[in-house]
Amino acid sequence: MERRRFRVFGRVQGVGFRYTSARLAARFPVTGTVQNLPDGTVQLEVQGVPQDIAAYLASVQDHFAGNITHVETVSLPILPEEAGFSIVR
């Protein structure tokens, strides 16, 4: 189990990124959050086993292939009691 923060760059606000990312998360055994940041990027925090996190991120990147320019990744401490995947407003 691990937790990762992904900062997603490109045209990722105002295109349904948060909603779609949350909807895609339901297809994978991951938990976490997605939120817009003031600088125009989007932050995903995703928790699960490494293979599931990678598969989830790949599905997000495939869906928004024309919008994402790059993604920065940071490891975070896991949140053992986290459940579900939510949009932070």
Image (cartoon, rainbow, N blue to C red):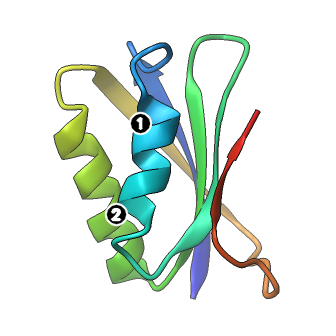
Q: Residue 13 in the image: x percent, y percent? A: 50, 16
Side of 16 relative to 62 (left or right): right
Q: Residue 32 in the image: x percent, y percent? A: 63, 63
| Crowd rating for badge 1 (residues with CA inside 10 Å; few <14, some 14–19, many 20+) | some
| Crowd rating for badge 2 (residues with CA inside 10 Å; few <14, some 14–19, many 20+) | many
- Amino acid at dot 1: Val
Q: Quadrant of residue 77?
A: bottom right
Q: Secondary structure at mark 1?
A: strand
**Along the line of sight, which residue is nearer the eye, 89 or 32?**
89
**Along the line of sight, which residue is nearer the eye, 44 or 70?**
44
In the rendered view, tell whether residue 16 sits above or below residue 46: above
Q: Quadrant of residue 31?
A: bottom right
Q: Quadrant of the C terminus?
A: top right
**Along the line of sight, which residue is nearer the eye, 29 or 49?**
29
The first of marks 1 and 2 along the sequence is: 2
Q: Which residue is mark 2?
A: 56
In the rendered view, tell whether residue 20 sits above or below residue 84: above
In the rendered view, tell whether residue 74 sits above or below residue 68: below
Query: In percent of the image, x 37 and y 75: which residue is there?
Result: 28
Query: In percent of the image, x 25 and y 55: which residue is there?
Result: 58
In the rendered view, tell whether residue 43 sits above or below residue 81: above
Q: Residue 55 in the image: x percent, y percent? A: 27, 68
Determine which of the numbered discs, if any, sits on residue 71 in the image: 1
- Amino acid at dot 2: Tyr
Q: Secondary structure at mark 2?
A: helix
Query: In percent of the image, x 71 and y 78: which residue is there?
Result: 83
Side of 12 relative to 44 (left or right): left
In 3D space, how far apart are the residues under numbered discs 1 and 2 (Cα atoms)? 14 Å
